Image: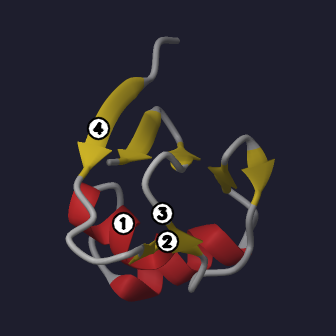
Amino acid sequence: MKKEKIKLRADEEYIRLDNALKLSGSVETGGQAKIVIQNGEVLVNGEVCTMRGKKLRRGDTAEFEDLILEVC
């Protein structure tokens, strides 16, 4: 299955992983983001990440289900 790529613009130095998932529409709520992250369902730069406050900076990617989020 081909994954859809979404580019997220970081207006600050970084964007938190849980906020990135919400902004992209991957999840509906912060609580939902917390659950999928803590369950190990999200990859950051190709590795499982269970830290919901992980700081994503320009060039980082996060993958969840059929989406790839690229921070630019």
Residue found at the far top of this picture: 1
Q: Earlier in the sequence, mark 3 or mark 2?
A: 2
Left or right? Give the position of 39 relative to 6.
Answer: right
Q: Amino acid at mark 3?
A: Arg
Q: Residues within 10 Å of mark 4 (few under 14, many from 20)?
A: some
Q: Earlier in the sequence, mark 3 or mark 4?
A: 4
Residue found at the far front of this picture: 13
Residue picked out by circle 1? 20
Q: Earlier in the sequence, mark 1 or mark 3?
A: 1
Q: Amino acid at mark 4?
A: Ile
Q: Earlier in the sequence, mark 1 or mark 4?
A: 4
Callout 1 touching callout 4 (CB < 8 Å)? no
**Percent from the top left, x then y, of residue 47?**
79, 49
Q: Nearer the viewer, residue 15 or 52?
A: 15
Q: Amino acid at mark 1?
A: Ala
Left or right? Give the position of 55 relative to 21.
Answer: right
Kind of element beneath mark 4: strand
Residue picked out by circle 3? 57
Residue picked out by circle 2? 17
Rounded to the nearest angstrom, the CA distance separating label 1 from label 2 is 5 Å
Q: Amino acid at mark 2?
A: Leu
**Percent from the top left, x then y, of residue 9?**
22, 56
Residue picked out by circle 4? 6
Q: Residues within 10 Å of mark 2 (few under 14, many from 20)?
A: many
